């Protein structure tokens, strides 16, 4: 009789049943979220299902972030649809410029430790940073949750990743998760729950943990958790730890003490290499933002490198803060000033050019260095551009010289 | 929903992500026809011309990885794809396809070649390759998925049953 993994524990708490990998459960959900990419179809499906009232308006959120402000009339009308639905149903709608859905769900307490949360966006896995069982679903699934407050799930097997050692001063959580994504592969954790543990995570900020859990989506996982040891939140909570006798489908033990900065080369987030291999590759465009790396400490990391300098001629740097509150903090502490003085363009808090909807589509033949989480062909709106993924510090170091460059080590001031 | 289909196979490789099925720049619409016009265009610009309604899309491992966009199976369905066959699917794509009533069939080992004529028998859980004479067993789906697919998708299922 083995103990439970974090995923099994949460499903146990939700359903009262001891579940095993492969068991199908129908579980009550603690919250849901949809964006301007997924909400319109979800609202349609909800109506077609015969839905009149959503099951719990206070647990639902709609976020206008993927193409915000609207770049054309078609999208403007989809935004209007969301606003009308939110008003009729008494649901909170996060407006243009408030930020990226995943950042907002955490900032505004829609998701908390132990919650079962469904989001109509694949990076819903981000909330595993908070010890929540959070999984991405499509529009029709989301509509079903809106209607019933429930979801059917297959209990995932768990993959445990134990990291040994501390991160080097020139490596960040992004370098670590890129490296691990390269190791596991883009389908290596399909249908699974990933659990991360080790000293490096215990010292990690909430932002760093979110960056880690975020990219479990790039491993194909259903959900992912950073071990709650060391987790700090602005409210009291019950951490959910795995039992010592929990059973894992697989455990990876990985030494990270010597890990250098990493990049994911085109055209897949698991095509990961130590930065050395690509040093000197010319780039024309740097992007910092997204649900992976658009938080204050990411902007600060870039500002440390860019303060008092100018980005290279012929290079542009676009920054999309993850939320309005991130932007305000960056304005207050001088980070925004340093970035803009160096030549950066700060755009509306939101997804920005991450998914190729607007606000910075690369040209044919251009190479982008980006702190996002996906670099599939065409991801940023042009199949003839190439995208390298890296940490915010690496993006900043690279736009300074116009080619992929290693960031300097960061020592606490 | 009908249980017997016959059509031609269009075969692609492993890890076809949803950005390749329908790029993010086209996803913000409720017009399924507009999605179908761009389906797979970065992967195979002539897919739309080659596709006959009722044909099958056949892939290798991890079909539909990446974003949660339901526009991906919807674009395929609207373009006329009768079923998607893969060694296995990325999880959100799998759910989304079944939820909109597009059969997504896992065959862990197959050697279907481009242009093969297939017959899919959902009740028997089998795919016959009329070109080579081979038969493949479809991985059984969880019961709840089967019920949703049989209802023609999750919208119909919930309209009938009200809950799971
Ligand atoms: S920032 Fe990018 S990856 Fe994150 S939710 Fe927005 S589009 Fe998706």
Image (cartoon, helix red, strand yellow):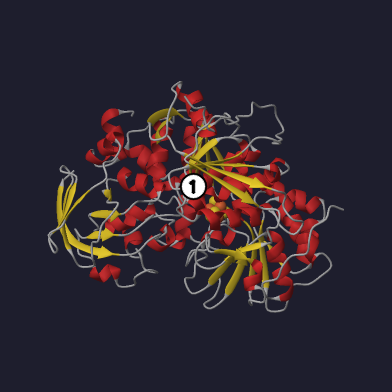
Give the residue at x 15% y 53%: B5
Give the residue at x 54% y 75%: A363
Question: Mark 1 sits on what residue?
Answer: A121
Give the residue at x 16% y 46%: B2
Would you say B109 lies left or right of A376 here? left
Would you say B15 lies left or right of A203 here? left
The residue marked by circle 1 belongs to what chain?
A: A
Q: Secondary structure at mark 1?
A: loop
Residue B150 appears in view = yes
User: Does residue A168 lie above or below A112 as drawn?
Assistant: below
Give the residue at x 52% y 27%: A3
Residue A95 appears in view = no
Ligand 1 contact, mark 1 (Cβ < 8 Å): yes
Residue A384 drawn at (x, y percent)? 48, 74
Residue B38's quadrant in the figure? bottom left
Task: Determine the residue located farthest toward the top in the rendered image.
Answer: A16
**Count of numbered badges drawn on the protein:** 1
Residue B75 drawn at (x, y percent)? 33, 57
Q: Quadrant of the N terminus of chain B?
A: top left
Q: Quadrant of the C terminus of chain B?
A: top left
- Label 1 crowding class (10 Å Cα cut-off): few <14, some 14-19, many 20+? many
Residue A7 drawn at (x, y percent)? 51, 34
Q: Nearer the viewer, residue B132 or A41?
A: B132
Residue A340 drawn at (x, y percent)? 76, 64
User: Does residue B154 lie above or below A274 as drawn?
Assistant: above
Q: Nearer the viewer, residue A240 or A290?
A: A240
Task: Determine the residue located farthest toward the right in the rendered image.
Answer: A413
Would you say A168 lies left or right of A108 here? right
């Amino acid at each position: 009789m083995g103990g439970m993994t974090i995923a099994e524990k949460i499903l146990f708490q939700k359903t009262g049943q001891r579940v095993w990998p492969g068991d199908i459960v129908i579980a009550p959900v603690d919250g849901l979220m949809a964006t301007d990419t997924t909400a319109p179809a979800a609202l349609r499906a909800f109506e077609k299902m015969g839905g009149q009232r959503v099951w719990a308006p206070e647990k639902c959120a709609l976020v206008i972030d993927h193409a915000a402000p609207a770049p054309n009339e078609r999208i403007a009308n989809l935004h209007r649809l969301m606003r009308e639905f939110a008003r009729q149903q008494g649901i909170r709608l996060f407006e243009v410029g408030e930020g990226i859905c995943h950042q907002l769900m955490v900032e505004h307490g829609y998701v908390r430790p132990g919650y079962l949360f469904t989001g109509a966006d694949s990076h819903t896995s981000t909330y595993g940073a908070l010890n929540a069982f959070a999984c991405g679903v499509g529009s029709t699934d989301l509509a079903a949750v809106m209607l019933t407050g429930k979801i059917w799930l297959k209990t995932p097997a768990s993959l445990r990743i134990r990291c040994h050692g501390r991160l080097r001063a020139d490596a960040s959580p992004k370098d670590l998760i890129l490296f691990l994504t390269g190791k596991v592969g883009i389908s290596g954790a399909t249908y699974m729950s990933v659990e991360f543990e080790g000293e490096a995570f215990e010292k990690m900020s909430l932002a760093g943990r979110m960056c880690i859990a975020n990219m479990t989506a790039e491993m194909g996982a259903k959900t992912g958790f950073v071990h709650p040891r060391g987790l700090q939140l602005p409210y009291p909570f019950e951490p959910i730890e795995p039992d010592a006798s929990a059973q894992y489908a697989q455990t990876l033990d990985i030494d990270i003490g010597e890990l250098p900065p990493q990049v994911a080369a085109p055209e897949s987030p698991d095509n990961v290499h130590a930065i050395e291999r690509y040093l000197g590759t010319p780039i024309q465009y740097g992007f910092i933002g997204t649900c992976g790396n658009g938080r204050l400490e990411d902007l600060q990391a870039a500002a440390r490198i860019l303060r008092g300098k100018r980005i290279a001629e012929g290079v542009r740097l676009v920054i999309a803060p993850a939320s309005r509150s991130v932007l305000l903090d960056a304005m207050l502490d001088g980070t925004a000033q340093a970035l803009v003085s160096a030549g950066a363009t700060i755009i509306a808090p939101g997804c920005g050019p991450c998914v190729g909807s607007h606000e910075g589509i690369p040209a044919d033949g251009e190479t982008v260095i980006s702190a996002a989480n996906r670099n599939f062909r065409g991801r940023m709106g042009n199949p003839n551009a190439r995208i390298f993924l890296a940490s915010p510090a690496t993006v900043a170091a690279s736009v300074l010289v116009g080619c992929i460059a290693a960031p300097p080590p960061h020592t606490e001031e | 929903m009908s249980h017997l289909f016959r059509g031609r196979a269009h075969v692609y490789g492993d890890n076809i992500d949803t950005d390749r099925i329908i790029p993010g720049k086209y996803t913000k619409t409720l017009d399924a026809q507009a999605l179908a016009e761009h389906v797979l265009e970065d992967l195979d610009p002539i897919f739309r011309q080659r596709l006959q309604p009722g044909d099958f899309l056949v892939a290798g491992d991890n079909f539909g990885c990446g974003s949660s966009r339901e526009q991906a199976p919807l674009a395929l369905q609207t373009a006329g794809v009768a079923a998607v066959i893969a060694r296995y699917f990325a999880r959100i794509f799998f759910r989304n396809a079944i939820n909109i009533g597009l059969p997504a069939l896992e065959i862990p080992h197959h050697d279907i070649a481009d242009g093969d004529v297939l017959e899919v028998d959902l009740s028997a859980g089998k795919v016959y390759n009329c070109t080579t004479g081979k038969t493949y067993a479809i991985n059984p789906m969880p019961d709840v998925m089967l019920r949703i697919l049989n209802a023609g998708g999750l919208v119909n299922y919930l309209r009938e049953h009200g809950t799971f």
